[in-house]
Amino acid sequence: MSRRLTLTRPDDMHLHVRDGAALQAVVPFSARQMGRAVIMPNLKPPVTEVQAALAYRERIMAAVPAGSLFTPLMTLYLTDNTTPQTVQAASAAGIIAFKLYPAGATTNSDDGVTDLFKLLPTLQAMAEIGMPLLVHGEVTDAAVDIFDREAVFIERVLQPLLAQVADLKVVFEHITTAEAARLVAAGDERLAASVTPQHLLMNRNHVLVGGVRPHHYCLPILKREEHRLALLAAVTGDASHKFFLGTDSAPHAQHAKECACGCAGIFSAHAAIELYAEAFDSVGALHKLEAFAAHNGARFYGLPLNSETITLVEETQHIPQAYAFGEQRLIPLRAGESVAWRMES
Ligand code: NCD
Ligand code: ZN
Ligand code: ZN
């Protein structure tokens, strides 16, 4: 008998759905599995104003298949010019968070923040309202090695930020290192972290051994095996309630990844919950998956839990070589390979 697992419908607390034809292509994948998703605002141009976020929300809703209850949770992109007034207007309009991209750190981050500590009044306004700040936690200093950029961010930015803005709720997004896992596990309840499937399942050998694998290139870049093991220990350990599902599913057209300067981002929405099931099962912790996928994030954001359930079956699921992506092709994680679990429809 194949093992089966029924759990509260999960939420994806870190999701890129892009816009236009790309959005039409990818939203149905998330809508099939997830109850809600925190939508990243790094469009071109970025979503920096309330009206733009509400209009983007409508475009996402229009791409949700009939019958799905999928709900996008909107965020705004923090810039050097974000004011406390924008924070108040965002909160009144139901925007649930602001996203910090250090300028130049990742895909579409050119309009990101150059000096976070010049934004203290804005951050204080967020703390007063209880609006979380979501952080892409890497320094952009060219002198810092790419594999160290998250750990250095903790020292240079995150710890000073937590000390200077009392009560600011922070999500350390897509954490990749033992240092980040340790900080979040030891921190107070206003600090939490999202963790991607790729950082629980792969290490940097998956990017570089046997040839450069552009479809395993994301930011923060995959790290050493000891870091992957630390993340698995964190999401299943004593402080596991501070860690939650955030796929960072980040679709890019095949040609944008397979070229001389391929961009960062891994698409995983087609099999997100199944990939996490594999990761948790690898350490005998499938019983911890439901809290990670469906409870911890909702509790951190102060949202009710989803009332529906989904069921996973341990059955080999073959993953196609590519999906349509408007006029382009989208190469999913595990393309042409398989995943050990399958969500029942
Ligand atoms: C993301 C993207 O493509 O938008 N890429 C990535 O490698 N994670 C941006 C991000 O989340 O940093
Ligand atoms: Zn990021
Ligand atoms: Zn992301």
Image (cartoon, rainbow, N blue to C red):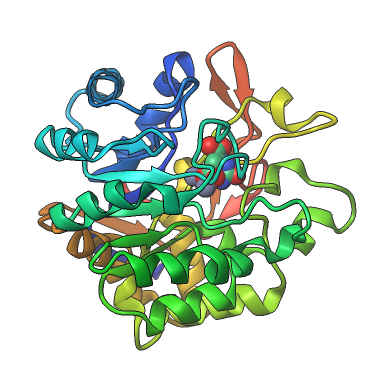
Q: Position of residue 27 (x, y in %)?
A: 37, 29
Q: Position of residue 13 (x, y in %)?
A: 34, 51
Depicted 200 relative to depicted 50: above or below = below
Residue at the image position 20 percent from the left and 33 percent from the top: 68
Quadrant hosting ligand 1: top right
Q: Nearer the viewer, residue 312 or 158?
A: 158
Residue at the image position 30 percent from the left and 43 percent from the top: 37
Q: Position of residue 254 (x, y in %)?
A: 69, 27
Q: Nearer the viewer, residue 38 or 258?
A: 38
Q: Nearer the viewer, residue 248 or 64?
A: 248
Residue at the image position 14 percent from the left and 52 percent from the top: 129
Instruction: Report if residue 91 is visible in the image.
Output: yes
Is residue 257 found left or right of 92 in the rendered image? right
For the C terminus, the image quarter is top left
For the N terminus, the image quarter is bottom left
Depicted 1 relative to depicted 139: above or below = below
